[in-house]
Amino acid sequence: MRRWRVWVLLALVAGEAGVFLWKNGDVVSLSRPADALAADPRFAETAHRVLAQPEVTRRVLERIADVAARRSDSALQLQAITRIAAVAPGDRHVQLRLAEALRRHGRLDDAAVLYRALLTPPGVPGAGGSQ
Amino acid sequence: MTALLIYAVYLGYRGLYTLNPEALVFSLTVYFAEIHGFFSLFFYYFQVWTMRGRTVRPPTSSPTVDVFITTFNEEVDLLRQTVRAAVHMRYPHRTFVLDDGRRAEVKALCEELGCDYLTRDTNEHAKAGNWNNAFATTTGALIATFDADHVPRADFLERTLGFFDDSRVALVQTPQRYHNLDSLQHRVSWRMRRLYGEQDVFFNLVMPGKDHWNSAFFCGTGAVLRREALEPFGGQLTGTITEDMHTSLALQANGWKSVYLNELLVTGLAPMDFASYSSQRLRWAEGNLKIIKHVNPLTARGLTVAQRLCYFASMYHWTIGFAKLVFYLAPPLILFTGQFPIVRFDRQFLGFYLAHVVSLVVSYKILSRGTGRILMDELFNMANFFMLLVAAKRFLVGRGESKFVVTSKRGGDQDDRVVLPQYVLIGITLLSLVWSLLGLGFGVSEDVVGASVAAFWSFYNLALMLAVVGLALRPSQKRQAVRFRAAVPVEVLAAGDGQLGVTLDISEGGCTLLLPQPLPAGTALRLRMYFGAQTVECEGTVRTCHQGRRSGWAASGVQFDHADVRTVDRLADAIYNMTVPEIFSHLSQPSWAAQQWRYLAMRVRGGRLRAVRHETYLPVRVIDQSGEFLATTRDLSASGLSLVAPRAIAVGSRVTIAMSSGVDAWTSAATVVRCTPVTAPSPEFSTCQIALRIDAVDGRDLAVMLSTEAA
């Protein structure tokens, strides 16, 4: 008699999963294995849509940066690492990766400025990167 | 005081530093719910800080007393025991049955029992109108009033009338206790000998606290009122559906005093099913809130500041639904949106929060004096929140007003539609948990700590919601009469070969009987039951029989086949005079913590350890110099036993006891070491609790009996 209530709950959960997919389909599609994403011709398009969102978790940004590196898409990699650096401003390792991404993308001057800032000891005037 | 101070500091800190500007509405809503909780706590502590205990004195004058029993559609069988008990109360009085159902069978009942029958042509103003109709046609200086299901003890008037020696006392209220302990609002632990009743906090703490401030109010039944005080109103005030509190407020504004006597003098029936329970709470909540439209306790003339606070607290209590809804919906909202009502989850906040929670719990436990249980209170808050919201909506909007409806005390069929709001909350909470898991799993969100906090809160709420649904889905009560757990010695006179047994439970309609030998279903019996010195004989039929695996006892479900109503009446007398008081006394053990504390204190004082006692109910034949009688044990140990006997035996006397269990029988000599009289409301049902030290057991080890019977 009350079994239908369980079915209603299951239907609601299924509907909720549908709404979740509809709302976060791009992010969900980025949770596939990196090899599969690297081979996916629509990856760049999906990644750009995700990067256009105001709030993206670091885990997703790292995934984009990783797959972009595998695909040798330096522009996309740089974009992803720039976002990571924005959400983790005190992370020197991320700053280093950002400098590397700038270098790969051909923005050598910017890369040099960042490398120099990272190599300058903290406390010295002009030192970049927070601790 | 410290707890309230810490709560206030916590709220100040919350307001200054932790409101989330990114989710301001949500944050403020939760904050206001917490402020509501602060005032609830303040009112509660204010009321229970000092409780007034009353000393009963016999009346010095002889006022005339009328007894009103209001009825509308309750079963005549139910009404019968109330009317009989009212008629048999010891102080001279006239009993009036006020029947708004205009039923011939009730009139016939009144003629049979020798009381007056009053009715009227309309049902205007429901119960209060019915009462006022009788008020206008009677003359007693004092009026005792009972609902149709509230059975008074024989000494009810003797215990209450003395307070009216003070000419300014307008009413004496006694607590409402319920003898159907399997009702929705009771939780019984027979092992721990503890009883939780949802209204215990009110009747054991709040009302004695209100009494301290002279603001205990009339609760509709189990009370005595002074006619002179009510005459200006023509009886009880009408216009609200909780006329009792409304009338009390008006009386106290006129300078009258009230008295609360916290003694078990009346027992009634609590709602058995969730629908009846909810409808009763809705009526109380709506009625209490709407009183403020007639008499505002904060502004009414004639009340003291403390009385204003006490009455306002009673109304404020019913607004808790809003705050609870906020707390039930906040965790799902957090899990769905990732937004928190609190912006800082740092150590400082946790420090404030923990100090607040710990002080709140500790102070609540201290001031609740062993009565309040936070989890049970939360469970019933969850059960009530929607009805409280409906009541608040009706109060605020003023539409959809309910009428007075008699609360059904017979269990209805299972109907979980009444817990639809809880189902909706369960759905929302589960969906939010799934949503949060999906978000964390796919990397849409990564606030694991925040989600964990909200999930923990959600699971706590979910447990309460499922418990409430469980209440609504309890198997429906099919019995016509309430069964009382009682160990009464029984002799099977016919078809049982004179077997001696003991009841597990008993009602006016039947019993569960433990016998050494099984009796097949369908067997017709003649039983003689020993209620102290009184015996009741009746015929019955075995309906079910189960043989115990270890104890050897056979449990038979026996339905009584009453040839005449007098046997029912005798059974009812025995139940209400012996069984009910014993049950409430049995279930009045202090909490486990209090027991451990006493034990420790006893050990520190160098007290002697007694042999472990096993709660055991066995029929015993006791033979002393005066003759022989039947009794039942209450507990057994390796060195002795205690039993309930129909008469006293001198301490130091030697007796012979013959006990039988499901597998064996023992005979032993014993010495009486203690004999304590247990006074029943009707003296003929008084008994004695006798402690015996066993001198020798007939060659067999008592430990064998202990182990089998303890099982």
Image: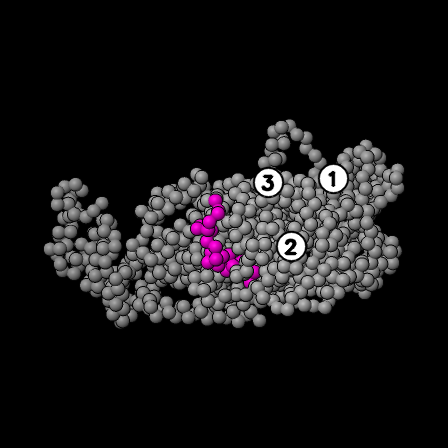
Q: Residues within 10 Å of mark 2 (few under 14, many from 20)?
A: many
Q: Which residue is mark 2?
A: B145
Verify CB contact (< 8 Å) between mark 2 and mark 3.
no
Q: What secondary structure is the magenta-colored segment mainly?
A: helix
Say if labels 2 and 3 share a chain: yes
Give the answer, above or below, for where B648 lies relative to B140: above
**For residue B414, side relative to residue A65 (left or right):** right
At horizontal 62% and vertical 31% (from top left) the residue drawn is: B603
Q: Which residues are magenta?
A: B279-304
Q: Position of residue B527 (x, y in %)?
A: 83, 56
Q: Position of residue B90 (x, y in %)?
A: 74, 48
At horizontal 58% and vertical 57% (from top left) the residue drawn is: B234
Instruction: Identify the amino acid type marked 2.
Output: Thr
Q: Nearer the viewer, mark 2 or mark 3?
A: 2
Quarter of the image containing the N terminus of chain A?
bottom right
At horizontal 62% and vertical 28% (from top left) the residue drawn is: B605
Chain letter belonging to callout 3: B
Label 3 vs 1, first from the N-terminus: 3
Instruction: Identify the amino acid type marked 3.
Output: Gly
Residue B675: in magenta span: no
Instruction: Identify the amino acid type marked 1.
Output: Ser
Q: Which residue is mark 3?
A: B53
Element under label 2? Answer: strand
Give the answer, above or below, for where A120 lies relative to B480: above
The picture quadrant where one finds residue B506 is bottom right
Q: Does residue B661 appear anywhere in the picture?
A: no
Residue B637, which numbered label? 1
Verify CB contact (< 8 Å) between mark 3 and mark 1.
no
Marks 2 and 1, how far apart at CA: 46 Å
